[in-house]
Image: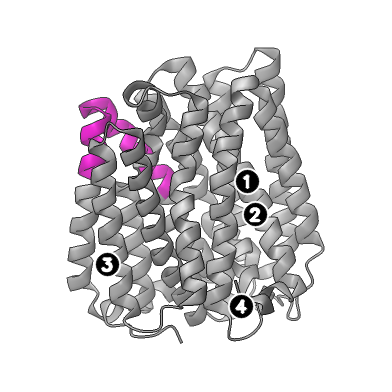
Amino acid sequence: MDTALFRHRPFVLFFFARAVSSFAAQIAAVAVGWQVYALTHSAFDLGMVGLAQFLPVAGLTFFAGHAADRYDRRRVVQICQTVEGAVALFLAAGSLGGWLHVGEIFAAVAVFGAARAFESPAVAALLPGAVPEGLLQKGTAISSSAFQAATIVGPAFGGLLYALSPGVPYALMAVSWLVSGWLIGQLVLDKPVVAKEPPTLRALFAGVGFVRRNQAILGTISLDLFAVLLGGATALLPIYARDILHTGPWGLGLLRGAPALGAVVMTWAITRYPISRRVGMRMFQAVIVFGLATIVFALSRSMAVTLMALVIMGAADMVSVVIRLSLVQLATPDEMRGRVGAVNFLFINASNQLGEFESGMTAALFGAVPAAALGGIGTVLIALLWMKLFPRLRDVERLE
């Protein structure tokens, strides 16, 4: 780790706020997925969890990006995390009281999606102001490791708590989001956002035009869109845990955390040995490795092999994430970061939920194993195609 970053108070606050918030989100992924599948035993309903999160994101993302560029980004994040905490308390009360049904879970997940639509662009736009100049690649890698560390601890912890009582993990989520909001409130930036554009339609969709004009950014965002959309096999983990690997909530937590373990190891490697050349090609190679590991995951019947495949998927994905986020942040002026971050969130983060929906639908039609395997094959093919379609991205040499 770079000690200069952890001597910088704004980055320390940002890092721990993201870690705590991500911890809550990862507990939610395990608790909601297991509870829905336990109530319905339906791959279709697992896919609907992803769709319920995606629809509000699709409708609100551009408003959210504009809000991040016009208002205090810290306050935007705090409001969103307060809403998420309140919804988590609702889920805790319903689970403990025994009156929570699938319809209410879908409604709660939709509110989570709406809150994250506003939260994610604001958080992404805060990062460049929280790191010292010249350390953005390392700051991006380490801040991403906060998410990945939470993804290791959160699912395993959430699975254990769910086994004790379904309401307990939701209560812990609520506390975590409130703590994260408080940490964000303590963050002081040297350059606060000053709104320069009135809230017109042109300003609202300015991020789309910016991304369209920048072929390197368009290529990297769209590559991750299709890779995540096709490679969303983690949505099927409750099925793999329960029906293929024959384990319980604790085993599901281990499976959820395995990609994050690979990502943390890769973060350590990147902070010690930053990617200094052939950046574009490294990203394409990482996506191909991700697709191949997804195929191994799909075909495995062994817990050890499945965990290893997920670890490799997480490591490969971290390379892609660091390059993509660094390219986007370095190429975007600060007054546009919220709106460009919103486009990035819509393409990438929301495609996680749409990918879960696609995986659930494919699994309902063909079975979990063919669905995951087809997703891995599709990811490899997309990476090879994008190398031809976006030569400017393929030929990016350095992150400058």
Left or right of residue 272: residue 80 = right
Gap in Å between the C-alphas at discs 2 and 3? 28 Å
- Tell me whether the residue at label 3 lies in contact with that at label 1, contact meaning CB atoms closer than 8 angstroms: no
- Name the residue furthest top: 98
For residue 19, the mark is 2
- SS at badge 2: helix
Front position in the image: 272 or 228: 272
Left or right of residue 183: residue 351 = left
* Circle 2: residue type: Ala
Against 169, residue 16 (above or below) is below
Residue sitting at 74 percent across and 71 percent down? 10
* Circle 4: residue type: Glu
First to last magenta residue range: 352-375
Against 368, residue 17 (above or below) is below
- SS at badge 3: helix
* Circle 3: residue type: Gln
Gap in Å between the C-alphas at discs 4 and 2? 26 Å
Colour convention of the picture: one colour
- Quadrant of residue 286 within the rendered picture: bottom left
- SS at badge 4: helix
- Tell me whether the residue at label 1 lies in contact with that at label 2, contact meaning CB atoms closer than 8 angstroms: yes
Gap in Å between the C-alphas at discs 4 and 1? 29 Å
Gap in Å between the C-alphas at discs 3 and 1? 29 Å
- The residue tagged 3 is 285
